[in-house]
Image (cartoon, grey):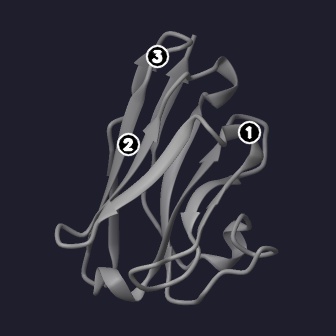
Amino acid sequence: HVQLVESGGGSVQAGESLTLSCVVSGAKYRSYCMGWFRQAPGKEREGVAVFASIGHDSTIRYADSVKGRFNVSRDSAEGTMYLHMTDLEPEDSAMYYCAGDPRRKTDESWHDGFWWMFWGQGTQVTVS
């Protein structure tokens, strides 16, 4: 049974930074694509940053709205994925979710939550 647990959310001022963590248990971390999604009130869930393929040289995808400000990384030995967020904007306020799936993601599917099998409970990020 795969479990994903996010942490690191909080309330920050615009322009500040925050790092989210996602710990994976119950699965071989290296066998899954992993990614970050977010959902703000009244808006659809959107893909933020993902490892779209499995393996050491995994393809990374970012939403246009976060390119240059967010960076996704992982520590495979620890089974942990991170989302380093800098220069945060009020528009980044949302519940952030960690997701995992054993299937490779295409350019058309990576940002669609439908194609991701496992989800964490989320961690709230508020930027004011």
Q: Tell me the number on the disc at residue 65.
A: 1
Residue 121, horizontal then vertical, whole percent: 43, 54
Quadrant where the C terminus is found in the figure: top right
How far across and down, in percent of the image, does residue 6 sit?
35, 51
Find the distance from the CA under tag 2 to the CA under tag 3: 14 Å
Classify 10 Å Cα crowding around label 3: few (below 14), some (14-19), many (20 and above). some
Q: Secondary structure at mark 3?
A: loop
Q: Residues within 10 Å of mark 2 (few under 14, many from 20)?
A: many
Q: Give how far apart the Cα atoms at labels 3 and 1 are.
A: 16 Å
Q: Which numbered disc, 2 or 1, marks the residue closer to the eye?
A: 1
According to the picture, the residue beneath numbered tag 2 turns out to be 20
> Whole-Å distance between the Cαs marked 2 and 1?
18 Å
Label 1: few (<14), some (14–19) or many (≥20) C-alpha neighbours in 10 Å: few
Residue most toward the right? 108
Amino acid at pointer 1 = Ser
Give the amino acid type for the residue marked by disc 2 in the picture: Leu
Q: Relative to 46, say whether 2 is above or below.
A: below
* Residue 62 pos. (x, y %): 65, 54
Which residue is depicted at the point 31% across and 80% down?
Answer: 29
Identify the residue position indicated by label 3 in the image. Answer: 16
